[in-house]
Image (cartoon, rainbow, N blue to C red):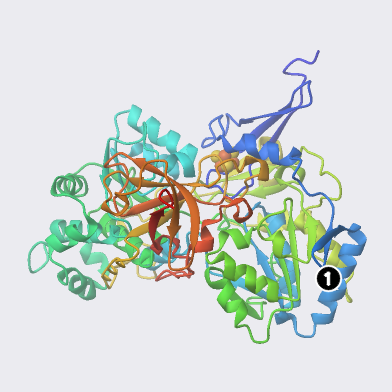
């Protein structure tokens, strides 16, 4: 029998859209099963992985997996050969090359990597249409770049040097188990954590005090703290940080437009909690602030992040060990993509761009219309707001190709299906949007049937175009992407042997308050937009939050067990008083309605104005919350304002 040391361990990585970007050791058991554990050498992975991994492995062997190309014929799908499928696509693309803006490329982050990203090279070369905007974090990114001149934060491990962490809205356990572990370690060594959220976060073991806030009103709390701590009198108190800010006049005007009691009334934070926060931000302890991405999925999401940035900057809790504001970093920032995702030297090769959060509307209005779409790495019908409209827009496109591994809500509206590999069937290199390590993901599973990587399918199509388009090889992609000041010459070798390398990073950013703006100054937010009143017919805010066990809509058909899906409301909510716990109900928005089961949570766990839905389950199994979410856009960064959605719940009990 093979011993542990005889079993071959493979160093690989997780390539899904998760900030942790884990380095992984995969070992094959004598019974043929692969056992995955976190790489103990990796400073962030620290030897453990999340519970999603079991489902990732299950996806590889799922009976629901589709492993052959399929063509829609009327209402039927027929299996066709890879050659036939590639020929059909090549012919359709060839016909449109004279007006390539009629070809649309939609790429998501279902699986990440440098080589995976190089699919873009093909569409950039022909000058197709593409997408822009964000379904995730764009408003906060633009807000941070506006204020600080760049998207950066202290090394994530520096959180351990803080004395207090303010977790402003992040569900640590569900969104990043390694950030959660870091927070646990921080508390164990005596650090205090205060969480601000409207509820929906699993705080057990991760928090010393929870401040419940009305959804989407965090900017008013940040403004109230600034009003009390920085600008209590006129003229403004001598504040060294304020002297290094631009935009002071408009900032002061915005602050003056609200009285303190109004700011507190709007955000619903009680005086005791406010004083607690005042003591934290106004005190001498080292404070680090983590900003959750949900905060910027409201209409004024960019503004909210800017007010929190301003609070941290003005109170001096930025640019020192243990003191920083953590939104995120770009996982692509260390890579050189010239010649990898676009032909060398080309700046904006796409003819047109469609905003992802408003994909349906913009596609339906497109002139000239889109005639061919290639969609991969995303279940866009499920993930984008207004799913019905997105489906309608796809149906209007004469030919839609989807590359995926399952019959998702998006594949339902395709004309041709290509079976894709899953993340451990193809190698790649991935970075993180949270830490400064880059990981090597080695393939250790064989692709089943005709499954190929997204890049292989596009290679096959591009070789049949006349003249053929040659995409950069894997070797070229890696060597070009790693040719960056962040890496040494030996980075690729190190990646292959050790599984990860650290990109060069100063550790602490914005030292002594010096930002990355050209003059080193911080730019203050120039407005405090009022929060719209609740519509009397829709008195709740629908927060469609992430799950802990699945990543986005990577949920297998066989794992859709909750039918109808649950919503959670507060026992103390006057807007659901007549609905009993466990009742069958409908959640209704101005966009549509869905059948759900209601769970009531004790007072104080979630805000009475909130209804929580755990998103990403599929429409075809009764889920798909984006069917009833409007395609509103945030104030900055063209991001989907999912959490601005108002709703009500009606019981079905007495029908
Ligand atoms: S989903 Fe995230 S935490 Fe889980 S294994 Fe992948 S990278 Fe690590």
Quarter of the view holding residue 470: bottom right
Evaluate whether residue 471 shows in this view: yes
Taking the image in four quarters, ligand 1 sits in the one at: top right
How many numbered tags mark residues here?
Answer: 1
Viewer-nearest residue: 185 or 160: 185
Residue at the far front in the pictured view: 655
Classify 632 as above or below 25. Answer: below
The residue under label 1 is 469
Name which residue lies at 59% across and 59% down.
382
Viewer-nearest residue: 74 or 487: 74
Name which residue lies at 38% across and 52% down.
611
Question: Horizontal and vertical percent for residue 606?
Answer: 32, 46
Classify 259 as above or below 485. Answer: below
Quarter of the view holding residue 206: top left
Quarter of the view holding residue 383: bottom right
Question: Horizontal and vertical percent for residue 28?
Answer: 75, 26
Name which residue lies at 28% across and 37% down.
163
Question: Horizontal and vertical percent for residue 473?
Answer: 80, 58
Question: Horizontal and vertical percent for residue 562?
Answer: 55, 42
Q: Quadrant of the N terminus?
A: top right
Viewer-nearest residue: 193 or 249: 193
Classify 381 as above or below 371. Answer: above
Q: Is residue 377 left or right of residue 166?
A: right
Evaluate whether residue 135 shows in this view: no
């Amino acid at each position: 029998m093979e011993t542990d040391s005889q079993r071959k361990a493979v160093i690989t990585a997780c390539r899904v859209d998760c900030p942790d970007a884990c380095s992984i050791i995969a070992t094959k058991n004598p019974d043929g099963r692969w056992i995955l554990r976190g790489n103990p050498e990796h400073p962030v992975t620290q030897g453990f992985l999340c519970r999603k991994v079991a489902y990732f492995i299950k996806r590889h062997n799922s009976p629901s997996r589709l492993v052959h190309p399929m063509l829609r014929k009327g209402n039927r799908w027929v299996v066709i050969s890879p050659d036939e499928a590639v020929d059909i696509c090549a012919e359709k693309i060839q016909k449109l090359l004279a007006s390539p803006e009629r070809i649309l490329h939609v790429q998501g982050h279902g699986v990440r990597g440098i080589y995976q990203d190089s699919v873009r090279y093909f569409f950039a070369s022909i000058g197709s249409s593409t997408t822009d905007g964000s379904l995730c974090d764009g408003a906060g990114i633009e807000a941070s770049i506006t204020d600080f001149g760049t998207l950066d934060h202290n090394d994530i491990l520096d959180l351990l040097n803080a004395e207090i962490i303010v977790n402003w809205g992040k569900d640590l356990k569900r969104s990043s188990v390694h950030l959660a572990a870091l927070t646990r370690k921080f508390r164990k060594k005596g650090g205090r954590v205060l969480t601000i959220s409207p509820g929906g976060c699993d705080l057990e073991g991760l928090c010393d005090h929870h401040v419940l806030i009305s959804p989407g009103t965090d900017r008013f709390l940040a403004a109230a703290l600034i009003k009390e701590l920085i600008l209590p009198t006129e003229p403004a108190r001598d504040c060294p940080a304020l002297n290094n800010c631009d935009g002071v006049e408009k900032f002061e005007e915005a602050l003056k437009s609200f009285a303190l009691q109004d700011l507190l009334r709007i955000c619903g934070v009680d005086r005791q909690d406010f004083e607690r926060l005042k003591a934290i931000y106004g005190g001498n302890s080292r404070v680090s602030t983590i900003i959750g991405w949900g905060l910027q999925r409201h209409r004024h999401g960019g503004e909210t992040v800017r007010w929190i940035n301003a609070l941290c900057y003005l109170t001096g809790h930025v640019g020192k060990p243990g003191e920083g504001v953590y939104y995120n970093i770009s996982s692509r920032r260390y890579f050189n993509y010239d010649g990898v995702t676009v032909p060398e030297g080309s700046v904006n090769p796409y003819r047109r761009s469609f905003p992802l959060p408003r994909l349906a509307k913009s596609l339906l209005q497109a002139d000239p219309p889109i005639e061919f779409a290639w969609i991969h790495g995303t279940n866009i019908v499920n993930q984008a707001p207004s799913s019905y409209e997105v489906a309608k827009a796809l149906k209007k496109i004469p030919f839609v190709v989807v590359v995926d591994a399952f019959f998702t809500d998006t594949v339902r509206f395709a004309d041709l299906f290509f079976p894709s590999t899953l993340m451990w069937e193809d190698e790649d290199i991935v970075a993180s949007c949270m830490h400064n390590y880059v990981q090597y993901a080695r393939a250790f599973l064989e692709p089943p049937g005709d499954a190929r990587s997204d890049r292989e399918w596009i290679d096959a199509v591009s070789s049949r175009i006349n003249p053929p388009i040659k995409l950069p090889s894997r070797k070229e992609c890696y060597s070009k992407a790693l040719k960056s000041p962040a890496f040494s010459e030996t980075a690729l070798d190190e990646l292959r042997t050790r599984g990860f390398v650290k990109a060069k990073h100063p550790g602490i950013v914005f030292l002594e308050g010096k930002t990355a703006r050209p003059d080193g100054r911080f730019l203050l937010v120039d407005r405090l937009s009022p929060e719209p009143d609740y519509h009397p017919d829709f008195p709740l805010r629908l927060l469609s939050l992430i799950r802990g066990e699945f990543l986005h809509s990577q949920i297998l058909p066989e794992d859709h067990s909750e039918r109808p899906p649950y919503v959670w409301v507060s026992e103390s909510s006057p807007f659901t008083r007549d609905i009993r716990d466990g009742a069958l109900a409908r959640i209704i928005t101005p966009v549509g309605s869905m059948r759900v089961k209601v769970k009531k949570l004790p007072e104080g766990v979630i805000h009475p104005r909130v209804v929580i839905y755990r998103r990403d389950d599929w429409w075809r199994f009764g889920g798909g919350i984006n069917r009833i979410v409007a395609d509103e856009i945030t104030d900055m960064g063209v991001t989907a304002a999912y959490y601005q959605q108002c709703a009500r719940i009606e019981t079905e009990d007495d029908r």
